[in-house]
Amino acid sequence: MSDATVGNTLSIKVIAGSTREGRFSRTAAEWIGKELMKREEVSAELLDLRDYDLPFFNEAVTPSSKQEPYKHAAVARFTGKIAGGDAFVIVTPEYNHGTSGVLKNAMDWVYQEWNNKPVAFVSYGSVGGARAVEQLRLIAVELQMAPIRNAIHIPGDQYFPVLSGKADVQELFAKLQKPVDLMIIQLLWWAKALKNARGGG
C-alpha cells in the first residue's frame, strides 16, 4: 500500500458496547466491521470493551482539561485507539431506557481524541434501542463529535428470537442491508469532510 493510499484511508473504529455474558454487541460489531471493509477506502477495527479493563472514571482532572495522558495502561491503550480513528460506529444495547454503564464509562475517559469526528450508532432492544441512541447523541455532542442522522435500530421482535436461538442472525442482518448501506454512505461523507477540516486529508 502506497503512502498516498494510506493517507486517503479512513480509519473507522467499531465499538462493541456491552461486556455481559451472551451479549449481541460483539456479533453486531463484527457484522458492521465487515460491511465497512467492503469499501476500499476504509480500514475498520473492532474495539471490544472486554479487551479494555477500564476502571470507573476517578481522575481529579477531567479529560477535557488533561495536559498529559492518563497513566492507567488500559485507559492509555483505549485512548490511543480513539485518537487513531477518523470515525466511529458504536454498537449499544438498551438498558433501562439508556446505554450500558461500561460504554458510558469508556466514553467519559476520553475527550480531545473524540473531537471533530463523526459517529454512527447500531442499537438493539425492545424499541430498537432508540432511547439508548438518543442518550448517546447528547453525549457525543458534548464530546464535540458529529452524530450522523442514519442509524440501525434492531427491534426486539427481531432481536430476541436471534438471542434465544430461534432465528438466524444472518437472515436478520440481510434484512438490514439497505439501511446499513445508507448509514455507511453518510458516515463516510462526514468522515472525509471532517478529516479534511482537521487537516488530515
Image: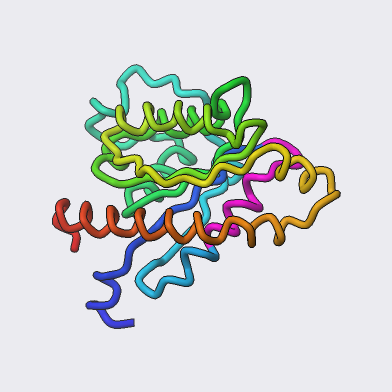
Residue at the location (28% across, 53% down)? 190
Quadrant of the rendering where the N terminus is positioned = bottom left
In the rendered image of this protein, does residue 201 appear above or below residue 118? below
Quarter assignment of residue 21:
top right
Which residue is found at the position 14% from the left and 56% from the top? Answer: 199
Tell me the magenta residue range.
20-33
Q: Position of residue 76 (x, y in %)?
A: 40, 41
Specify the principal SS of the magenta part.
Answer: helix
Q: Where does the image place residue 52, in percent across and percent down from the top left?
A: 54, 42
> Where is 108 relative to 189, above or below?
above
Q: Quadrant of residue 113?
A: top left
Colour logic: rainbow
Q: Nearer the viewer, residue 126 or 113?
A: 126
At a point 56% along the width and 61% down the height, the residue shown is 177
Residue lying farthest to the bottom in this orientation: 2
Q: Pinpoint residue 179: horizontal percent, then vertical percent.
A: 50, 54
Image location of residue 70, percent across then percent down: 36, 33
Does the magenta portion include 66?
Answer: no
